[in-house]
């Protein structure tokens, strides 16, 4: 069952958590974030969220009245927080400019990717905000990768973990003085993860290929890499990622994809309007009509499922994506 916004949880549910979870935040608050000490002098009242994950965590924590704006949305907002999100200004679904962010006079900026807030960011460096006295927060998932000159999104030598997401929820809930809401959200996610693992505990070993998008059928496909969040979805469903690269977002040609020979194709639905192959429908049409690709066993046997593209990012959508794929697996002819 999809999670309701935390503000809608009853007092009985919140009462399950101890006094520590209900304790108020003492300001100034200093936390460690991606190797930096971040100090927040008081509860933010005019925050900007750069990236869908940062924004949706804040919305699930019931913080829309403290959000000045959001930006960078590969997919539509979660339905359960759509009304809350409508109260927050959207700068752009793509990369915003630093000027547009500063025009909102933020007192706190959170980002989900280093490309939104990092040394080589398309938007800004953390120091750009810090020099103006604006504290920043970068998702622990984003700074847990190893970066190199050839891969802006980095690589991992071990499987991404929900623990990184739980730390992010806990940190943000303390920054905004809503620690009890953060603990409620974490406990809900943990229960849902446990339920999925139990459901697929006896599952035969499956391999999944996660296709995010491609500029065109002739171009390499952007895929979810082996140790990235897509690998976590495969793991929670009793299988593994057919793409074994350490890079979070490898670009792979169709010869390499056919060689991987996945049991299940996961076609991402990306709601932005950038490439024709952003949509799951167009991905499926290509898979089923291309003379060569259509001969792959997963395609011939109809083992193609659809998942939100946002679920391929290291975000709260990861669990929603796993649940989305799980529902469709029950209908497939699996080995």
Image: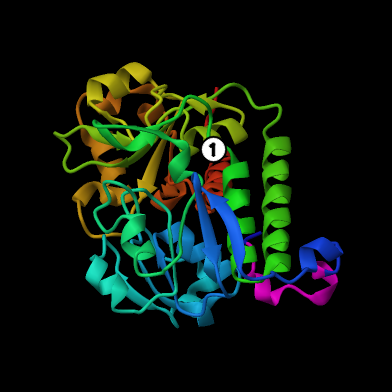
Residue drawn at (68%, 55%) of the image: 186
- Total marks shown come to 1
Residue 40, percent across and down?
A: 54, 67
Q: Residue tagged by mark 1?
A: 233
In the image, residue 227 sits, relative to residue 180, either above or below, namely above
Quadrant into which the N terminus falls: bottom right
Q: Nearer the viewer, residue 44 or 267?
A: 44
Does residue 237 appear anywhere in the picture?
A: no
In the image, residue 325 sits, relative to residue 218, either above or below, namely below
Residue drawn at (16%, 34%) of the image: 219
Does residue 121 appear anywhere in the picture?
A: yes
Query: Toward which corner of the image does residue 102 lie, by quadrant?
Result: bottom left
In the image, residue 131 sits, relative to residue 197, either above or below, namely below
Farthest residue toward the top? Answer: 259
Residue drawn at (78%, 63%) of the image: 21
Mark 1 element type: helix
Instruction: Point out the stretch of residues depicted in magenta.
Output: 3-14
Q: Is residue 77 left or right of residue 211?
A: right
Residue 129, percent across and down?
A: 35, 64
Quadrant into which the C terminus falls: top right
Residue drawn at (35%, 61%) of the image: 73
Q: Nearer the viewer, residue 238 or 154?
A: 154
Query: Toward which corner of the image does residue 274 lie, by quadrant?
Result: bottom left
Other-residue count near label 1 (Cα within 10 Å), few / some / many at <14 / 14–19 / ≥20: many
Q: Is residue 19 left or right of residue 277?
A: right
Residue 308, percent across and down?
A: 43, 52
112 within the magenta span: no
Q: Is residue 67 left or right of residue 122?
A: right
């Amino acid at each position: 069952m999809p999670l309701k916004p935390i503000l809608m949880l009853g007092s009985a549910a919140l009462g399950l958590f101890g006094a520590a979870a209900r304790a108020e935040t003492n300001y100034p608050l200093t936390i460690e974030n991606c190797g930096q000490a971040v100090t927040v002098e008081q509860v933010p009242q005019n925050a900007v969220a750069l990236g869908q994950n940062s924004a949706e965590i804040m919305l699930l924590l019931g913080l829309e009245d403290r959000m000045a704006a959001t930006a960078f949305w590969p997919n539509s907002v979660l339905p359960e927080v759509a009304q809350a999100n409508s109260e927050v200004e959207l700068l752009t679904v793509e990369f915003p400019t630093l000027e547009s962010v500063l025009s909102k006079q933020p007192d706190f900026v959170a980002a989900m990717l280093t490309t939104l807030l990092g040394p080589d960011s398309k938007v800004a460096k953390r120091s750009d905000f810090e020099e103006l006295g604006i504290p920043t927060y970068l998702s622990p998932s984003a700074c847990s990768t190893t970066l190199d000159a050839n891969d802006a999104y980095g690589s991992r030598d071990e499987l991404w973990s929900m623990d990184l997401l739980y730390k992010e929820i806990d940190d943000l809930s303390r920054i905004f003085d809503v620690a009890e809401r953060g603990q409620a959200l974490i406990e809900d996610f943990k229960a849902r993860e446990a339920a999925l693992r139990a459901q697929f505990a006896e599952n035969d070993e499956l391999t999944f290929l996660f296709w995010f998008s491609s500029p065109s059928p002739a171009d390499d496909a952007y895929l979810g890499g082996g140790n990235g969040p897509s690998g976590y979805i495969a793991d929670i469903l009793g299988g593994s990622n057919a793409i074994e690269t350490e890079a979070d977002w490898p670009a792979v040609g169709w010869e390499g994809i056919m060689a991987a020979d996945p049991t299940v194709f996961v076609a991402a639905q990306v709601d932005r309007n950038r490439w024709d192959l952003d949509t799951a429908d167009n991905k499926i049409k290509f898979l089923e009509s291309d003379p060569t690709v259509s001969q792959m066993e997963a395609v011939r046997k109809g083992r193609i499922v659809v998942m939100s593209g946002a679920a391929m990012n290291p975000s709260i959508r990861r669990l929603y994506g796993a649940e989305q794929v799980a529902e469709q697996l029950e209908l497939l002819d699996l080995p």
